[in-house]
Amino acid sequence: MESSTSETITWLARSIFQSFPGEVTGLRFYLLSCGCIYYQRVFRNGGLDPTIGAYRDADSGACGSCMSQKDPWEKRILDEMVVYYEGFEIK
């Protein structure tokens, strides 16, 4: 994985965790051959969100592969990554 992709995933994970504090404990990222990043939220009970989120750098423009929906996105997965949010609160 390129360092720019790793930085993008780190930035994206931080943004999502901040948007869903306490609700989302992890994120499963799928890196696609077209350059898009798809992700699913992982909830406290370990369940995966059935909704798939997508991210693509705005400078890259629209993705022809994703827009055409010719092949399922699952066939274009090059790599997967899971990021967990861990925090401790001492009272």
Image: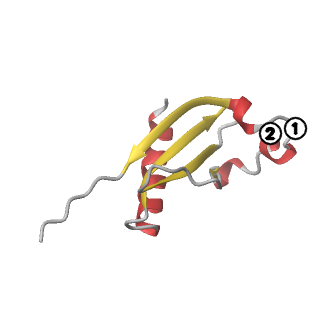
**Residue at (29, 53) in percent of width and height:** 86
Q: Nearer the viewer, residue 7 or 82?
A: 82
Residue 76 placement (x, y as % from top left): 71, 31
Identified by mark 1, the residue type is Lys
**Residue at (45, 53) in percent of width and height:** 13
Residue at mark 2: 65
Residue at mark 1: 70
Quadrant in the picture for residue 3: top left
Residue 77 placement (x, y as % from top left): 65, 31
**Residue at (42, 48) in percent of width and height:** 10
Q: Which numbered marker is on residue 20? A: none
Drawn side of residue 31 relative to residue 14, left or right: right
Quadrant in the picture for residue 78: top right
**Residue at (58, 54) in percent of width and height:** 49
User: Which quadrant holds the C terminus?
Assistant: bottom left
Crowding around mark 1 (Cα neighbors within 10 Å: few <14, some 14 to 19, many 20+) is few
User: Which tag, 2 or 1, sits closer to the chain's start?
Assistant: 2
Drawn side of residue 78 relative to residue 42, left or right: right
Identified by mark 2, the residue type is Ser
Vertically, is 82 above or below 11?
A: above
Crowding around mark 2 (Cα neighbors within 10 Å: few <14, some 14 to 19, many 20+) is some
Q: Nearer the viewer, mark 2 or mark 1?
A: 1
CA gap, disc 2 to disc 1? 7 Å
Furthest toward the bottom, the residue is 91
Furthest toward the front, the residue is 45
**Residues marked 2 and 1 touching at CB (< 8 Å):** yes
Q: Secondary structure at mark 1?
A: loop
